[in-house]
Image: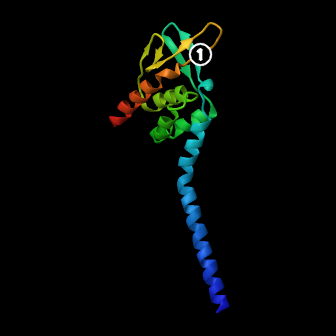
Amino acid sequence: MIARRWFQFRLLTLLGLMTAAAIGLACWPTLRLYWLVETISNDQVCVDGTTLGLMVQFDTRAAQQVRSYGPRANPALIVALNDPDRFAAAHVLLTEINCREYSLNGGKWNELEIALYGDGRIDFHPEQIPHLQGYWKARLGKR
C-alpha cells in the first residue's frame, strides 16, 4: 500500500515537472525577446549626418538578436516605444524589421526627428513618442 502511494506520488511529481518544463520551454523565446528589448537604449544608437541625410546605425549584440526575431519582435518593440530612454532604439529596430524603404528628409529619419549638435550630442526629442506610436500603429495595423 505504501509502495503504491509512493509510486503515485513520484509519477505525479514527474508529470508535474514535465509540464512545468514544457511550459518553460514554450515561453522562453518570448521571455528572452522581451528581456533583450529591455536591454536596448537610445544611447546605443549612432547617428551621423551626411550630404544625403541622416545615417542611423544600431548594431549592438542585443539589437542583432532582436532583428533575428523578425516581425515577431514587433509587440515587444511597440511596448518599448513608451519609454523615453528606449523609444528611438525601438523605432530604429521596427524600421529595420518592417520597412524595405524609409524616408530620409532633413532632420528626420523615417518619421524620427533627430537633432545633431556640434559637440557630438544627439537629441531624439521624446515629445514625439505619441506621433511614433501612431505611425507604427497605422503601419503595422495594415498587415
| Scheme by which the image is coloured | rainbow
Q: How many marks?
A: 1
Q: Position of residue 139 (x, y in %)?
A: 37, 30
Q: Residue furthest front?
A: 127
Residue 41's quadrant in the figure? Answer: top right
Whether 79 is drawn above or below 28: the answer is above
**Residue at the disc numbered 1:** 122
Q: Residue furthest left?
A: 142
Q: Residue at x 42, y 21 (%)?
A: 102
Q: Residue at x 54, y 53 (%)?
A: 27
Q: Position of residue 9 (x, y in %)?
A: 63, 80
Where does the N terminus fall, quadrant-wise? Answer: bottom right
Q: Residue at x 62, y 74 (%)?
A: 13
* SS category of the residue bearing label 1: strand
Label 1: few (<14), some or many (≥20) within 10 Å?
A: some
Q: Closer to the camera, 33 or 124?
A: 124
Q: Closer to the camera, 117 or 110?
A: 117
Where does the C terminus fall, quadrant-wise? Answer: top left
Whether 137 is drawn above or below 19: the answer is above
Residue 49's quadrant in the figure? Answer: top right
> Tag 1: residue type?
Ile
Q: Position of residue 101 (x, y in %)?
A: 41, 23
Q: Is residue 45 left or right of residue 78?
A: right
